[in-house]
Image (spheres, helix red, strand yellow):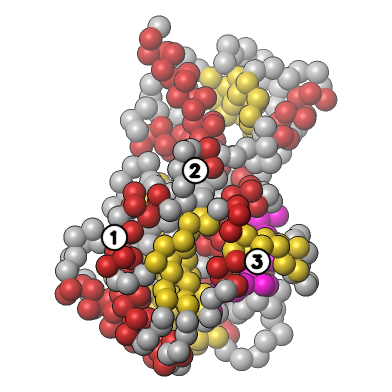
Amino acid sequence: MTNPAKKKALVAVVHQELSESYNAYSEKDLHTVKEMLLKSLQLINFSPDRFRGLKQVIIKPNIVEVPYQATDGSVITDPRVLEAFIQILKDYGVQRVVVAEGRSVNMRYEDFRPEDVFEKTGLAEVIKRSGGGIIGWDEPDYVEIDNPGAELLPRINVPKSILDSDMFVSIPKMKTHCQTEITVGIKAMQGVYSVTDKIRFHNEAFPWKMIDILRVIPPHLTIADALIAGEGYGPIYSQPVRMDMIVVSEDVVALDAVCSYLMGIDPDEVPMTRLGHSEGIGIGDLSQIEIKGEDIEAVKKYFKRSAMLWNPIGASKNVRIFAGGACRFCLAQVGASLMRLKFEGLLDKFKEDIKVVVGYNLPDTPKKYEHVYVIGDCAKNYLESLGKLEGTVVEGCPPLPSKQIYELFLKHINKGEKE
């Protein structure tokens, strides 16, 4: 990776054993996390005095959506980190602290306000008792601004509340991801987009989309919550990895590079990190990053990656997946649907084989299936061009939300159970 910047980025990695649970903690753990945060800021030469006199600080946590299955603290931002940081801001006299999150793609089709996710996860109580406010980003809350230098979005919609704030702080969860290898600081910016824009470029152009929003509203500070990190099929179906760690930087690209390494993944394997580095958004080369605090070799772990990152073929004996020239984004929608069925104990409830096709240049299989699912625009257009389109079509590039695929499978399972 090449980057014209010469100044090294600073990233703090702070570890401290915690004794309580993310969902049942006292002042003891809260005090420890607060000290970890203050130490992290000191290590990167970010004086908390910079908070003094600020009228409004906006915080973007990592909520995703209400998880379909309990994941032991590995999916959303740990309330201990959020509460401790709000306390620090209030201690230093910030007049107004607001915590904001938008509607996820799946939640777009639910009778569900963006604010509701705070209540469902229990974070609303944490935010309110800490003296913070809550904003739920929905379509009317966005303004369109110019984005000089953008590759995909020369005009971009951003939350007005971020533009109106004196400081923007992102607090993502450190996790592996089924489509983007990792999700930490850069990927968390997907949550800043409106739900309409979340759907756009949710394909192999995705890294450019993330970099385009960082050109106009990069977080002033990113705090990666790795108290309980997530491995495996993130971002929703993660398995917990206890790290008792916080990673902090003003450079979101550098933070992602370090977090990637802490999960046992070379930063150069992650397209978003590579692109953020080469585009000059930040530093993604570990040799150009000064890591302060812990010895990362001593605290790093090798996380399980998504077993179905590239292809969910074989995830279910009965779901016969045939992929031609398919990208990871369509494949991941199928994989996410199967993972949800697995979490709900339904993956082995299919009463007969079904066929799922993804991508163009599909193999011509001789066996006939009663139930065929055509996933994504590439598969649909390819089969149409041959005059062979049949079965249930789920359109999109990729088809979003994955819930619609899940519901097709679920309907088939339910039908099978009645027969």
Which residue does the numbered mark 2 point to in the structure image? 107
Give the Cα distance between marks 1 and 3.
30 Å
Label 1 residue SS = helix
Mark 1, other Cα within 10 Å: few <14 / some 14–19 / many ≥20 = some
The image position of residue 359, as x and y in percent, is 69, 35
Question: Do the residues bearing badges 1 and 3 touch, measured as CB atoms within 8 Å?
Answer: no
Q: Residue at x 35, y 76 (%)?
A: 85
Q: Residue at x 37, y 81 (%)?
A: 89
Question: Do the residues bearing badges 2 and 1 touch, measured as CB atoms within 8 Å?
Answer: no
Which residue does the numbered mark 3 point to in the structure image? 213
Q: Is residue 278 visible?
A: no
Give the Cα distance between marks 2 and 3.
22 Å
Q: Nearer the viewer, mark 2 or mark 1?
A: 1
The circle on residue 125 is 1
The image position of residue 413, as x and y in percent, is 43, 19
| Residue 175 belongs to the span the image colors magenta | no
